[in-house]
Structure formats: C-alpha cells, structure tokens
Image (cartoon, grey):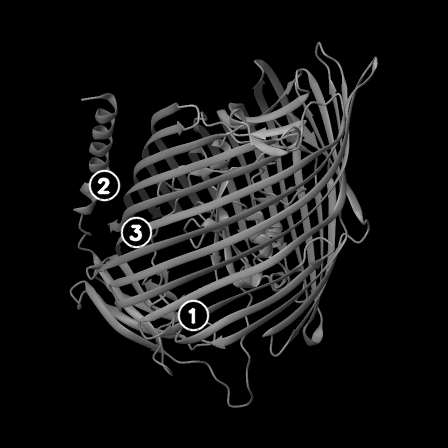
C-alpha cells in the first residue's frame, strides 16, 4: 500500500470516528412545549415572534418563532408554566401549561394572536430595528434598518459595518486584512470569486437584507479565510404573493449608469427568489508616472510617463426555487450567472538614464480587453424529524465554473537602443469545481451539535501565449518560451464537528475540522509536474458571556488555512508594461494562520461594538518584487515568502442622538510586523494603519433626509512598500414618496478636489520604485429605489448548504 493510499484510508477512518457516531445519537427524553403562532385574521404563520416562558421564580427561557411560525422549549421539568406571546402590532397573549398533566410533552398546536386596533383613528405602529446584533462568533449588520441603504451600493455600505473597512482603492479589508472570503446567502458564488469589488459596486444596497461578519468561523466552514467570512444575505423573506425592489443609479465622471432589483414570489408550496443588477463603469483618461532607481552594482534611473483610460460592464443574476413538500421535507435549487467585459487603452513614454547619460528609450501604445463569465448551480435537500424539529439532515451538491479571457496588443514606437518589437499576449484561465456535502444538525440535551463530511474536486487551467512581430515577414510569430499550458487539480476531503452549549449567560462553541488535500499540477508545454499532499487539523473555539441585558463579551481562537487560487498559480507573465511585469507561481503551497480575538458589544440607545485581534502566520503566499538588472525589469511574482504578525482593533459606535439625528463612527486599526525574502535577502517592514469612517443622517418632515460621510484612510503598509493616505467625503439628499415605497437620492462625492494622487512606493535590496497615479476624485451620483408588493407567509429556505470558502484569489494590489 503506497503512502497516499495509507493517508487516504487514515482520513476516512478519522471521518467515521468524527461523524458516524453522532448520526446514531437520539435526543434525550426531556419535557417539551411546542406550538405554532399564527395571525388570527389570516391564519398565516408568523415568523420572528418572541415567546417567553415563566415559572414561579420568573422568566426562565425565551424563544423566537422560526420561519414557519413554530417554536419549541426543551429540557423542561414536568411542572406548570406560563407562556406569553408578544409581537409588535399584536395583543399579548398568555397561556397556562401544565407539563405534569401532559405527561411531560405539551403540543399547543396553533396559537392565534389578534392584531391591535383602535376605534378612534388609524394607528400606524412603527419601531426602530436594531442595526447591529452580536453573535458568539461575529456580528450582523441590518442594511434594511439603515436609511442610507436606499441610496447606496453594497460596497459603499461596507464602510459602516463593524470590523470592515475600505482602503484608498475601495478594496475591502476585514480587521485590516484582505484574506477573507465572501459568501452570498451562506454559499459561495461565482459572483464573488473573480472581482468582488466590481460586483458589490453594482449591487444596490436596497436588495440586501443584512451583512454578517464572522470573525471566528466555526469548524463547519472551510478552513480558508484568514481574517474571517463576510456573508451577504439578499432580500429573501417573501410570503404568499409577491414582493420586489427596482433600483436605478448612476455616477459620473468615474462610473456610469446601473440598474438592479429583486423579486420574491410564493404560491402554496412553491417559492421563488431572484435578484440581479447590471452596471457600466467608465474611467476617463488619467496620468501615471513611474520613477525607479537601481541601487545595486548596476546603477540607473527609469522614468515613465503615461496615460490610461478604461471602461467596463458588469452584470449578474441569481435565483432560488424552493419546494416544501411538507413540514419535514424541503428541496431548493440555486442558480447564479455573472459576466464582465473590460477594455483599456494606454500610452507611455519610457527613458532609461545613468550617470554617464542616456541609455535607452521607447514609446508604447497598448490596448487590452478582458471577458469573464461565471455560473454556479446548487441542489439542496433538507430532511426534518418529527421527534425534534431542530434536527436537520441536509444533502447538498454544487457545480461552479468561471472563465476569463484576456488579450493585449502592444505597439513599440520610437525605440532607441531598445530591442523589443510589437507583441501580443493572450491569457485564458478557468476554474471549475464539484462539491458534495452531507450535514447533520441535532441536539443532545442542552448541547447543539453540527457535523458533516464534504468532498471538493477542483480543476484550474491556464493557457497563455505571446506573439512577437517579425519585421522581415510582417507577421506575428509565437514565442514558445513565453507561453505555457497549466492543468492544476485539487481534491479536498473534509469532516467536522461543532458543539454549542449555553448556561447562566455563558455561551460556548467549539469544534475541529480535518482536511486532506492533494494537488497535481501539469505544465503541458515543458512537460513538468508538481505534486503536493497535506493533512490539516484546524480547531475553532468561541466563548460568549452576557454581562447584562445590554452587553456581551466574546473570546475566540481560530486556525485558518490559505490555499492559492488560479490567479496566484497561473505562471502567465503580464508584460503590458515592458519594465513592470506580474506573474503567478504554480509551485505555491498553503499557509496556516492562528488568531485570537476579544470582543465587546453594548446595545442600548448607543450601540458599541469593539474588539482586538492578534494573528500570526508563516510562509504566506505574497507578491514579491525583484529587479532583473539585465533587462531593467521589476518582476512581481507570488512566493511563499511572507511571515509576520498583526495586532488589530475596531470600534463601531451607532448613536441615534435624537429621533431625527443619527450618528455612526466606524474605526479600524492594525499594526503589522512583516518579514519577506526577495532574491535570497531578507526584507523587514512594519507600520501602523487605520481607517476612520464617520457618518451622520438627519430626517426632516415630509420624507426629506440629508446625510454626510467622512473617511480618513492612513498610509498602507505592505511587505515591500507603502502607499499614501487619503480623506474622502460625501453629502447626500434623499426624498421618500408614496408611503416610503419610492425614494430618490442624490450625492456629491469629494466636492473639495477634482483629482487626487495615489502614490505607491516599493523597495527591494537593489531598487526603489515610486508609482504616482493621478485619479479622478470628485463625482456626483443619483439613486432611484422603488419597493412593491405585499406578502404574508415566509418562504422556507434550507438552513444548511455548501460553503466553499477555502480559496484565495487575491491580486497584486491587495
């Protein structure tokens, strides 16, 4: 038996020890109270209704009804209780329950509650929904409770979410780190795989219900996502009938028009939820200057001046169809399709000099085009159990694929001592995967248990070619030394167990995940091969303590893994600028991160969310820049060369100062210490980074609202460089009409400056490089949002599904 076979057998043995025993567990025979809360007028089940349970000593338990209106109290003593049903807009109802007389099990059936009414005049019942809620492993931000969501996209709203910040290029950071994973409705999506910033920029915030930030992911999640997981929940709470949102938006001079919407339908046992958006994003011509000095044995200076402009279009559509055969059987299908098209044009003058004069010069004119498309489909079957409706068995399958095709034409003009001719580059990369998963959720007494097994089969492919113009023949000839075909296979087998227990205000959640990964990479052109095989055991622990009715403290430990994605593996060399190259590395290995987080939340009139996080890592895949003196090229290549540690913190304050004025402050900071290796030499860097995002909103009469936002972003520290700071601002005006169904918004963005300079400094042991980009800064935007429909009964959705969050596709700028 070979080594791999022995490891595979060991893996499946551990899986059996992990998972199979728990399938045989039966819930303890404790006393229970069950029921379903319904509207007395319509008979429809009511979700999210608060149920209180009291005995002689007072309230001992509380529960919230599920989406089908059901609730359950378990682990009760066989005595008498008082059960109270409370809901805004309904009369309170109290029932007496004697478990001793009911032999320990009381099924109350349907509990009808009556809507509150007034015979004197129409009464409009309103209430403030909490924007931020704390869980043991993270927080949830309710976009629908934030008025700014009607006139913003999801990317803009990210600035207000605790633990999240945006850097100067609008890249999302979680606790100061770009190593997170994004899920859509708890599942991976091709929309978030390639360029999540572009998709979230085109996604109207009005189509999103909430954003969940999971800072200590439990063992049920795949091991990837260094900093944690961002889960975006779309509007999917429909009932019998229909409900929808339509959004039109635009931005100029950078940006363009966009539209989006969502629709939910329910009829009997069938339900449909869909959302989509499309946008155009144009960037007018701007200038870039590159200054580079070689400081090694060969000393020279490169100066490049150029212009560039681009335009892009993005679109996506997602749908979910569900069929509820009965209260115990639920089938659902999810489908997501997305695509993008990008075009860019650039011109550049390049001059290389030394102390003794002019060495080299050339001009280039380049144009490029990129097409991308992705799709994924998921099938889920959820089985409930009559003995305990909290028990769930779920079978899931997912197929995912995306494809990117890049082409560039570069004309080399007015050359002086420069050997290259015109050239063309093409790069096609694709990724696909199939995933099968089984999850089982059940309770043993007061302990909630989640367990499961999972298999992922991935295929990454790359095909890149370079053709160089031959002046003698007048044709472009392929240069085989600058091309290759990559075939990369990843097979991942995983199993997990998670346990959750609560007592006397304490909450405990812990588990372990085991993963075995095999990688087989082939290079067709040069007949080489890379094989890797590794086994990981990753624990996750979260502890929560409720200090009072309004405050909670959490403590978590996580161990996460970072696997390279096709963007980092693809050895294609991007030579759109002949003196600045970028390439991937097919020999990359995964890296592990360990982190500890301490958090505190206070939820009164003022909501405060704060925390500190400490993490350390080694052999992380990072972009390493080095100078090739013979060709005067700085090449950036991904290497397992990064190690370091970081101490980060966050402070989010939401304060409704008055009934009209609301204030929000979202601060994030991190201090990092990094070590990397370039051309065999060690490079150390460290620094302090922070973001401060403040916003204010004021409501006037007759549906008018004004808002203002200010964001302070510090200089950015990377393994081999820094970038400059920036302060942004925006001021908006919103008008609500038609009983808040229609809203019109307009905003002035960065009114105090038309342009800003984006400055990035990179250094190695033998070079220093400065890139300055002059970018458009000032902009105007508009937003129209319309809500329609009326629904009563909520669509049931699978509570479990596939979450593939273990791949990193960070680019060179993150």
Q: Give the quadrant of the N terminus.
A: top left
- Identify the mark nearer the N-term, 3 or 2: 2
- Between the residue at mark 1 and the residue at mark 3, the CA separation in whole angstroms equals 23 Å
Left-right relation of 516 to 618: left
- Identify the mark nearer the N-term, 2 or 1: 2
Q: Which one is in front, 74 or 749?
A: 749
Residue 811's place in the image compared with 481, above or below, is: below
Left-right relation of 333 to 292: left
Q: Which element is circle 1 on?
A: loop
Residue 675's tag is: none
Q: Mark 3, mark 2: which one is toward the viewer?
A: 3
Residue 19's tag is: 2
Q: Residue at x 60, y 45 (%)?
A: 369
- Between the residue at mark 3 and the residue at mark 2, the CA separation in whole angstroms equals 17 Å
Q: Give the quadrant of the C terminus.
A: top right
Left-right relation of 324 to 813: left
Q: Which element is circle 3 on?
A: strand
Residue 238's tag is: 1
Mark 3 — residue?
396
Q: Mark 1, mark 3: which one is toward the viewer?
A: 3
- Between the residue at mark 2 and the residue at mark 1, the CA separation in whole angstroms equals 35 Å
């Amino acid at each position: 038996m070979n080594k791999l076979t022995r490891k595979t057998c060991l893996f499946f043995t551990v899986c059996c020890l992990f998972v199979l025993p728990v399938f045989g567990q039966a819930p303890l025979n404790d006393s229970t109270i069950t029921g379903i809360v319904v509207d007395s007028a319509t008979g429809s089940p009511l979700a999210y209704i608060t149920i209180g349970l009291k005995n002689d000593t007072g309230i001992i338990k509380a529960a919230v009804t599920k989406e089908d209106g059901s609730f359950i109290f378990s682990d009760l003593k066989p005595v008498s209780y008082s059960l109270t049903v409370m809901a805004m807009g309904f009369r309170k109802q109290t029932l007496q329950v004697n478990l001793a007389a009911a032999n320990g099990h009381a099924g109350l059936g349907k509990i009808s509650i009556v809507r509150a009414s007034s015979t004197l005049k129409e009464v409009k019942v309103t209430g403030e929904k909490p924007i931020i809620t704390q869980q043991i492993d993270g927080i949830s931000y309710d976009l629908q409770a934030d008025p700014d969501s009607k006139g913003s996209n999801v990317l803009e709203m990210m600035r207000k979410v605790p633990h999240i910040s945006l850097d100067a290029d609008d890249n999302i950071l979680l606790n100061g780190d770009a190593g997170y994973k994004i899920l859509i409705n708890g599942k991976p999506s091709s929309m978030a795989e390639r360029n999540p910033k572009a998709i979230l920029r085109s996604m109207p915030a009005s189509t999103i219900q909430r954003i969940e930030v999971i800072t200590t992911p439990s063992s049920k999640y795949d091991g990837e996502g260094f900093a944690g997981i961002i889960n975006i929940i779309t509007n999917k709470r429909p009932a019998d009938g229909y409900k929808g949102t339509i959004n039109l938006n635009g931005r100029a001079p950078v940006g363009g028009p966009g539209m989006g919407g969502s629709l939910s339908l329910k009829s009997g046992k069938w339900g449909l939820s869909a959302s989509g958006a499309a946008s155009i994003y144009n960037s007018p011509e701007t200038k870039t200057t590159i200054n580079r000095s070689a400081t090694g044995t060969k000393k020279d200076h490169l100066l490049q001046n150029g212009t560039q402009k681009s335009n892009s279009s993005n679109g996506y559509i997602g749908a979910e169809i569900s069929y509820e055969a009965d209260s115990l059987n639920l089938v659902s299908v999810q489908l997501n399709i997305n695509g993008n098209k990008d075009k860019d044009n650039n011109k550049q003058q390049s001059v290389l000099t030394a102390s003794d004069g002019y060495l080299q010069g050339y001009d280039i004119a380049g144009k490029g085009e990129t097409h991308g498309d992705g799709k994924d489909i998921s099938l889920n079957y959820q089985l409930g159990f009559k003995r305990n409706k909290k028990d769930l068995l779920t079978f899931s399958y997912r197929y995912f694929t995306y494809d990117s095709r890049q082409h560039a034409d570069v004309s080399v003009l007015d050359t002086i001592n420069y050997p290259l001719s015109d050239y063309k580059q093409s790069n096609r990369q694709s990724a696909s995967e199939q995933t099968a998963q089984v999850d089982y959720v059940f309770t043993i007494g007061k302990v909630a248990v989640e367990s499961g097994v999972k298999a992922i089969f991935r295929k990454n492919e790359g095909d890149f070619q370079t053709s160089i113009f031959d002046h003698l023949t007048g044709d472009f000839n392929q240069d085989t030394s600058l091309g290759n075909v990559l075939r990369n296979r990843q097979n991942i087998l995983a199993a997990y167990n998670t346990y959750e227990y609560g007592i006397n205000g304490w909450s405990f959640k812990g588990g372990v995940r085991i993963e075995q990964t095999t990688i087989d990479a082939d290079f067709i052109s040069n007949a080489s091969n890379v094989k890797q095989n590794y086994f990981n055991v990753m624990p996750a622990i979260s502890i929560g303590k409720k200090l009072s009715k309004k405050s909670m403290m959490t403590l978590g430990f996580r161990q996460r893994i970072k696997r390279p994605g096709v963007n980092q593996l693809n050895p294609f060399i991007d030579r759109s600028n002949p003196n600045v190259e970028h390439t991937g590395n097919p020999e990359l290995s995964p890296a592990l991160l360990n982190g500890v987080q301490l958090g505190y939340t206070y939820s009164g009139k003022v909501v405060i969310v704060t925390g500190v996080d400490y993490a350390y890592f080694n052999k992380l895949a990072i972009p390493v820049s080095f100078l090739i003196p013979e060709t005067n090229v700085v090449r950036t290549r991904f290497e397992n060369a990064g190690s370091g540690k970081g101490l980060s913190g966050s402070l989010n304050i939401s304060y409704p100062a008055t009934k009209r004025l609301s204030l929000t402050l979202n601060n994030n900071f991190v201090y990092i210490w990094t070590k990397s290796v370039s051309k065999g030499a060690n490079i150390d860097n460290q620094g302090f980074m922070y973001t401060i995002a403040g916003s204010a909103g004021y409501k006037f009469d007759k549906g008018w609202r004004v808002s203002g936002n200010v964001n302070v972003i510090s200089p950015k520290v990377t393994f081999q460089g820094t970038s400059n700071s920036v302060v942004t601002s925006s001021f908006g005006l919103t008008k609500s009409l038609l009983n808040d169904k229609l809203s019109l918004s307009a905003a002035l963005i960065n009114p105090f400056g038309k342009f800003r300079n984006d400055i990035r400094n990179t250094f190695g042991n033998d070079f220093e490089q400065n890139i300055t980009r002059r970018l458009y800064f000032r902009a105007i935007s508009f937003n129209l949002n319309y809500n329609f429909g009326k629904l009563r009964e909520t669509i049931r959705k699978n509570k479990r599904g596939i979450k593939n969050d273990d791949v990193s596709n960070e680019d060179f700028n993150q």
